[in-house]
Image (spheres, rainbow, N blue to C red):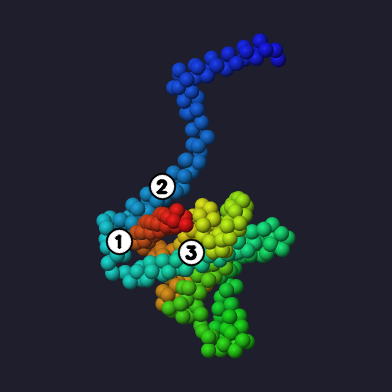
């Protein structure tokens, strides 16, 4: 290309740039072409139909005494919410069990998955094989996991009591899922075993994005392992932690199939969580209006806990 052609091209580019600066509305209209919204429309329609509309209906039915079968129902106002927050002891117990289960799972699963990720961060053959091994429980169905651990926790023939007996700890043997004060925590252990490998993968992806230069500089400064973790690893892995904590929180509240197949909420509602209680209210007691009110409070609880956890993780990363 000759010098004359180059100069002419530069002039044309300069003219185009000048017109764009003088007419920002035209440039903006090209970027925000309304026809592009057509690509979002199918997903938006599905979201409105399958998520928002059922949510609105749940709020509507929570104000009624609908039994789920009849066409007619009465409007009760806030009577279902008064019953929930005033005198339903089973709801209060299920609410507390949900929080205990969620806290135990979030703390245990986040800690275990981070430890496993740090131990298996390097891409060696052994580490890759171990990652696959720890990830394997995730591909199982919740009902299968529930039945496997029911055999482990069996008080007569279970693996847990057999191992304790083999090492001479017969006094530690117990009914496990029959213990009303601790059964919910033993189910939390099952949930942690079930999904720790899945969260480990998220942490490994986060750890592998941390520049190695930072660790080399820290080693030159003679920092300890704890200081490396506190001032480098933890702050830089905070985005992965936010994902793990949020996902684990929602996952623990949705552990309906695991608990329903393991204990059905028993004994004496000791492992009843909100999702199993909602199922029992709707499909066993045929109180769909009351179950809808429980669902609304359940949604509010999940949203509140998720927001608080995300803020706690962000604050912890800033202070580190």
Structural crowding at the residue carrying mark 2, measured as other residues with C-alpha within 10 Å and reported as few (<14), some (14–19) or many (≥20): few
Q: CA distance from mark 1 to mark 3?
A: 31 Å
Where does residue 314 sit, x and y in percent of width and height?
A: 44, 54
Q: Residues within 10 Å of mark 3 (few under 14, many from 20)?
A: many
Using the image, determine if residue 286 lies above or below residue 147. above
Q: Quadrant of residue 136?
A: bottom right
Q: Which residue is mark 3?
A: 106
Q: Nearer the viewer, residue 296 or 34?
A: 34
Instruction: Report the residue at 56% width, 75% height from top.
Output: 150
Q: Secondary structure at mark 1?
A: helix
Does the image show residue 291? yes
Q: Residue furthest front?
A: 221
Relative to 160, is 139 above or below? above
Position of residue 102 measured from the top left corner of the image (x, y, whole percent):
45, 65
Q: Residue at x 59, y 89 (%)?
A: 168
Q: Is residue 89 left or right of residue 314?
A: left
Q: Which mark is residue 53?
A: 2
Expressed as whole percent of the image width and height from the top left, the position of residue 275 reads: 44, 63
Which image quadrant is residue 286 in?
Answer: bottom left
- The label number, if any, that marks residue 80 in the structure image: 1
Query: Residue 46: x, y in percent?
Result: 48, 43
The residue sitting at 57% across, 17% down in the picture is 13
Q: Which badge, 1 or 3, is on the more N-terminal residue?
A: 1
Disc with the residue nearer the chain's start (2 vs 1): 2
Q: Is residue 93 left or right of residue 222?
A: left
Say which of marks 2 and 3 sits in front.
3
């Amino acid at each position: 290309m000759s010098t004359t052609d180059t100069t002419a091209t530069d002039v044309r580019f300069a003219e185009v740039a000048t017109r764009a600066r003088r007419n920002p509305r035209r440039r903006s209209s090209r970027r925000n072409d309304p026809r592009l919204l057509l690509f979002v429309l199918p997903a938006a329609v599905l979201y409105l139909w399958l998520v928002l509309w059922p949510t609105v209906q749940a709020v509507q039915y929570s104000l009624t005494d609908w039994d789920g079968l009849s066409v007619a129902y009465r409007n009760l106002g806030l009577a279902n919410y008064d019953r929930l927050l005033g005198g339903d002891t089973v709801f209060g117990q299920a609410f507390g069990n949900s929080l205990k289960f969620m806290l135990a799972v979030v703390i245990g699963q986040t800690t275990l998955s981070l430890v496993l990720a740090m131990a298996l961060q390097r891409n060696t053959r052994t580490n890759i094989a171990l990652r696959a091994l720890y990830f394997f429980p995730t591909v199982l169905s919740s009902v299968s996991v529930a039945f496997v651990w029911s055999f482990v926790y069996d008080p007569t023939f279970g693996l847990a009591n057999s191992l304790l007996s083999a090492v001479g700890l017969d006094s530690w043997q117990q009914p496990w899922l029959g213990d009303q004060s601790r059964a919910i925590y033993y189910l939390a252990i099952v949930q942690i075993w079930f999904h720790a490998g899945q969260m480990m993968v998220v942490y490994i992806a986060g750890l592998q994005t941390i520049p190695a230069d930072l660790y080399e500089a820290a080693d030159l400064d003679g920092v300890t392992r704890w200081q490396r973790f506190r001032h480098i690893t933890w702050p830089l892995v905070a985005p992965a932690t936010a994902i793990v904590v949020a996902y684990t929180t929602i996952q623990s509240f949705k552990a309906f199939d695991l608990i329903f197949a393991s204990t059905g909420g028993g004994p004496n509602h000791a492992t009843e969580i909100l999702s199993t209680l909602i199922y029992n209210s709707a499909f066993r007691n045929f109180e769909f209006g009351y179950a809808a009110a429980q669902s609304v409070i359940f949604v509010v609880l999940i949203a509140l806990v998720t927001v608080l956890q995300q803020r706690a993780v962000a604050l912890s990363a800033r202070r580190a």
